[in-house]
Amino acid sequence: MASNPVVDRIKGVVESHPIVLFMKGTPQFPMCGFSSRTSQVLKQAGAQFHSVNVLEDPEIRANLPRFSDWPTFPQLFINGELIGGCDITVELFESGELARMVTEAQKAA
């Protein structure tokens, strides 16, 4: 398969930060309820995370679903691995699993 510069860029972001949230808007100014909720639970779990505003980068917005095989936003990656979207992140938070994952990712960084 031919190299895709946008996919390479996404991969670079995911690999260079232990926790990455691709979202609509920013953690300070989320542009959708799901992105807002996801960034809130990440903060509550103690995460220091890198965010990418997909609304400001149409190429990432168009290519991320192909990269991750996940159709919607937000998308949370921890240690280079897709965790999922809002519902999964909230479930992990409520079970206490998200805090554990965040702690481990930040220790390894």
Image (tube, helix red, strand yellow):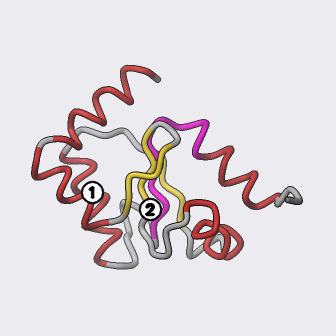
Give the left or right position of residue 96, taking residue 4 as reference: left
Span colored in magenta = 14-23
Tell me which numbered mark, 2 or 1, is placed earlier along the sequence.
2
Q: Which quadrant does the N terminus fall into? A: bottom right
Pointer 1 residue = 89
Pointer 2 residue = 75
Is residue 21 within the magenta segment? Answer: yes
Q: Residues within 10 Å of mark 2 (few under 14, many from 20)?
A: many
x 45%, y 75%: residue: 72
Kindly indicate the quadrant of the structure image that contains residue 27.
bottom left
Q: Position of residue 14 (x, y in %)?
A: 58, 45
Query: Which residue of the protein is positioned furthest toward the right in this rendering?
Result: 2
Q: Residues within 10 Å of mark 1 (few under 14, many from 20)?
A: many
The amino acid type, in three-letter code, at marker 2 is Gln
Is residue 101 within the magenta segment? Answer: no
x 82%, y 60%: residue: 4
Kindly indicate the quadrant of the structure image that contains residue 107.
top left
